[in-house]
Amino acid sequence: MTNLILFYFFAGLAVLGGVLVVTMRNAVHSAVFLITSLLATAGLYLTLNAEFLFVVQIILYVGGIMVLFVFVIMLVNLDVALHQVQFNRQTWVAGLLSFALLAELLAALALARSSSTGMQLLPAPHVPAASVQGNTEQIGTLLFQNYVIPFEIASILLLVALVGAVVMGKKRI
Amino acid sequence: MLQEAYFILSNYIWQIVDGLVIVAIFPLLAGYVVLLERKVMADMQARLGPMRVGPHGLLQPLADAVKLMIKEDIIPESADRAIFWLAPVLSVFAGMLSFAAIPVGPGFLIADMNIGLLFIFAVSSMGIFGIVLGGWASNSHYSLMGALRSSAQLVSYEVAVGMAMVSGLLLAGTLSMKDIVGYQAHSGFWLVFVAPVGFVIYLVGSVAETNRAPFDLPEAESELVAGYMTEYSGFRWALYFLAEYSNMVVVGSVATTLFLGGWLRPFAGTPAFHFLDYAPPLVMLGVTGYCVYRIPKQTGWDQKFIMAIFTGICFVITVPLAAALPHPVAGWQAGVHGAFWFIAKVMAYVYVFLWARFTFPRYRFDQLMQLGWHYLIPLSIVNVMGVATAIVLHREAGWNPVVSIGVTLVVTVLAALWLVRAGERREQATLKSAA
């Protein structure tokens, strides 16, 4: 029951924040609601007992990426954005696409409901949530033992992007 | 529904009470840290400091609090009202929330989280938004410049601080604050002796993270009036101040837990040093005695009365410390003594902050960034690798722990010296090209 209340609270907050990010005219306000949405998502992770993911979400997205976002937004002249047209005129295409996405989601849910027929799109977790005690060590072991090569490849990819950005951004290194 | 609410209440009642107590008494404590700062500053500049309100200025924090609360609260006309309101609250929220994971003594902690240290790191990284949004919402150039500097500074120093924490974590092998202290109790060594370079990096980085001098560029008076809080006044300004001091106490607590052995007494595992258990009550008794000695020296009965009240407070703290003797190992006795040592260590750490503030001149912004990016971050990475190597040499290859730590420490220090030399050479090269 408590879990359910928490889920709806965080999920509602995340959706509300997401909607407000798009509809706010002021870019800083949008950023504040994006932070709200990201924090609510972190809360959702916590209700799923994924405490490591919860903290990483806050450190990386809220404490790192969003600070850079706000940093850049503050340098932009906001007065220009206030007088521009906020929404473009692609209502029909956007509506069609979102209906397609909704249909896909509903189909997935319907398939998951009839999981007894063999299609297991959303299998139930086979570990009772309450019995999971501290998954930080497990994540560490998985990342650095079982999946160490994909993990390192992903980090090298990020490093390459970083170095590339510096090389392109700076005339003289 | 009701049953579940009852379940939550009955299980977490002490956590809720603890949280309320922290929120209620911390502002007062922060006020006394301010008084301490002013007294230390006065001492270092051969002055007396605040002496007017109460004996030796002991009631100055209360007077300051009343003054700040009844001051006019000005919101600039062109400010973004909602964010202007939100920003200081966010700062205080982040500062206070970290206390949830800090173990003051064995049993004196709100939540023993499996991710305690990361939780504190995450929450304190959220505190930046209070500064950045406040600076932006004020709609003033000084505020905006302060906010920009602050976010750049915090983001760059967070890397070094995080890596310094990692060097401690590698040794302890856990993120839970309680287990980190438990590891140090078990091994018999505070981590500062095993990873001294990590501790130094954390010390420097935490000064920068809390925007304290000599890294207080976001609020550099000589260039930016008061930085991000230029437009703030009255109670809102007080909230920023409160956040700054609670951040100081939080970084002090993290350093104490991670590197200085948390609530452990010095030489906790050595029976020959058990006489140190008598230190806490004796210290408090000494303070009480000094207060008694000062009572007749006060002018006027009201000052004498206030001094007597402070004497009483010191005595009330002495009683449980003395009652816990001899050699507290468990229960409330260990809790009281642990809290004494913990608070003493945090205060010593905060004292180093104040000492640095009144000793070093303020850095220039490019010097600050250079220190962070060219020296601290590479050094912290070398340090993490060194500590990891020492652990492998000891645990896998079976080396003597002292030898393995010593060898990697020498390598780390050599790397630091090389960094300094490279920096000097780079500086000379830029000077030459400028000439």
Image: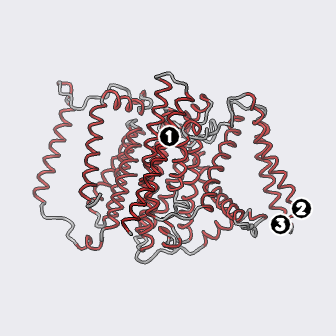
Q: Which residue is mark 2?
A: B296
Colour treatment of the image: secondary structure
The chain that hosts pointer 2 is: B
Q: Would residue A70 be found to the left or right of residue B318 on screen?
A: left
Q: Which residue is mark 3?
A: B302
Q: Quadrant of residue B40?
A: bottom right
Q: Label 2, secondary structure: give it.
A: helix
The chain that hosts pointer 1 is: B
From the viewer's perspective, is the residue at label 3 or at label 2 nearer? 2
Q: CA distance from mark 1 to mark 2?
A: 48 Å
Q: Residue furthest bottom?
A: B77
Q: Quadrant of residue B272?
A: top right
x then y, percent, for residue B424? 45, 56
The quarter of the picture where the N terminus of chain B appears is top left
Q: Which residue is mark 1?
A: B116
Dot 1 or dot 2, earlier in sequence: 1
Q: Amino acid at mark 3?
A: Asp
Q: Label 3, secondary structure: give it.
A: helix
Badge 3 crowding class, 10 Å Cα cut-off, few under 14, some 14 to 19, many 20 or more, is: few
Q: In this orientation, which residue lies closer to the viewer: B288 or B77?
A: B288
Badge 1 crowding class, 10 Å Cα cut-off, few under 14, some 14 to 19, many 20 or more, is: many
Q: Would residue B56 be found to the left or right of residue B374 on screen?
A: right
Q: Residue at x 19, y 29 (%)?
A: A114
Q: CA distance from mark 3 to mark 2?
A: 12 Å
Badge 2 crowding class, 10 Å Cα cut-off, few under 14, some 14 to 19, many 20 or more, is: some
Count of all numbered marks drawn on residues in the image: 3
Q: CA distance from mark 1 to mark 3?
A: 46 Å
The chain that hosts pointer 3 is: B
Q: Amino acid at mark 2?
A: Pro
Dot 3 or dot 2, earlier in sequence: 2
